[in-house]
Image (cartoon, helix red, strand yellow):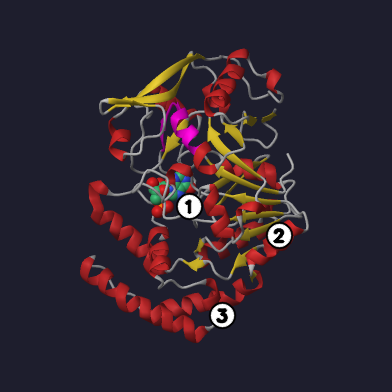
Amino acid sequence: MDVTATIVLGAQWGDEGKGRVTDFFAESADFVVRYQGGNNAGHTITIGERVFALSVVPSGVMYEECVPVIASGCVLDPAVLLEEIEMLTREGFSPERLRISSNAHLIMPYHRVLDGVMELYLGRNRIGTTKRGIGPAYTDKYQRVGIRVQDLFDPRIFREKVEAALEDKNKIISRVYNRLPMDPEEVTSRYLEMADRLLPYVTDTSLLLWNAIAEGRSVLFEGAQGTLLDIDHGTYPFVTSSNPTAGGALIGAGLGPTAIDAVVGVAKAYISRVGSGPFPTELFDEVGDWMVEKGREFGTVTGRRRRCGWLDLVALRYAARINGLTHLFITKLDILSGLDTLRVAVGYDGAGDSYREFPRQQRVLYKCAPVYEELEGWSEDITEARRFEDLPAAARRYIRFIEETVGVPVGWVSVGPERSQLVVR
Ligand code: IMP
């Protein structure tokens, strides 16, 4: 597929395997752009024996010709970014092509502290955040008291902004949450020390991308988290604080909708979720354990065990609509090999009604029972399949059933973690 301006995003609750998908597209992309979120994301990329976990730098960094971009809609923890840059340099990659928007907001130490203590105080009602300070950083952005990357290069303004922020945050940290207040001077000097190292990467990324698209270069927009974690369209409040959906790519990158050619939704052949929130097809039995163990469903960022369940096509149809998906990329089909029967949710029953579309009311999602279609499984090892015809008939039927129900063609199916373990339609 020509990737002139393509958005690749998660069509479920995140952890769909987007890392390997963007890595695949990045091979032919000139730019790979992160448009929202921060180091709450985790991308695992396997190259031969080597496994890399990236949380900030876009996966395009693995390719020599590709420019990785952190756009305006992101929140950036500069210390984590610098650590990743060091790791990549040590491993033989060249991160100097990285570009960072001067408009991106900074994750500050008080954001991390607040994320942690707020979760603690929520107790049973906690969201299960990654505790990276994402929510509090976006809160400040919308409250218009955030500190942006560009502020790092004006020490006087930076100091003033940190002092003003801590004036308020310190009261909350100490009086509400009973923690030690932070020293504005210490925070300021710690951040300003990093400014020089960040400066070479900082630019107007909207202009950079606009020019790139005008020149016909290929630009890949890489969503973090997933559709159902979108602050507006996900399972609120158990969501992240930004818009991973396709609209978020435009806002976050600073481009208009006419710039985009294709939107690829990445979905696992089953489904998983980390953190709290409703999950109609969640499994608590040995099949769920099978998915966790065989699929190695543990968080890249926090190491948490992911909740797993049958593929939910009600949710996937919803993702197709919200994002205007043009293609689906199904990952981890190999994990289902060996199960006699596969189930996929095609509707929900509950609260006295039945649903074909994703329910508007969150309480329905908690109470409903999925309506399953049963499909025959396959026992063959499919990890060597490279063409659609190589897959067993039952696996082909599974994929066809997904595209017919969702109404979006499946362009790729991954059958293992390696770059080469891919079926291209
Ligand atoms: P936050 O993004 O750290 O505020 O966490 C909010 C919710 O999004 C929690 O349920 C997290 O588990 C979830 N979340 C955040 N980032 C990811 C991700 O990359 N994959 C899957 N879930 C995520």
Which stretch did the figure color magenta? 306-319
Instruction: Please tell me whether mark 3 sits on a helix, a strand or a loop.
Output: helix
Whichever of labels 3 and 1 marks the residue nearer the N terminus, that label is 3
Give percent across and percent down for residue 17. Answer: 56, 39
How many C-alpha atoms fall within 10 Å of the one at disc 3: few (<14), some, or many (≥20)?
A: some
Mark 2 vs mark 1: in front: 1
| Residue 315 is inside the magenta segment | yes
Say which residue label 1 marks.
243
Q: Does 381 sit above or below residue 248?
A: above
Residues tagged 2 and 1 counted as in contact (Cβ below 8 A):
no
Q: Marks 2 and 1, Cα distance to the nearest angstrom?
A: 29 Å
Q: Marks 3 and 1, Cα distance to the nearest angstrom?
A: 28 Å
Tell me the amino acid under the disc marked 2.
Ser
Tell me the amino acid under the disc marked 1.
Asn
Q: Where, by quadrant of the figure, is residue 203 drawn?
A: bottom right
Residue 24 visible, this angle = yes
Whichever of labels 2 and 1 marks the residue nearer the N terminus, that label is 2
Instruction: Please tell me whether mark 2 sits on a helix, a strand or a loop.
Output: loop
Please state if 79 lies on the left or on the right of 350 as rendered: right
Please state if 227 lies on the left or on the right of 94 as rendered: left
Placement of the N terminus among the 4 image quadrants: top right
Placement of the C terminus among the 4 image quadrants: top right
Question: Which mark, by number, is residue 94?
Answer: 2
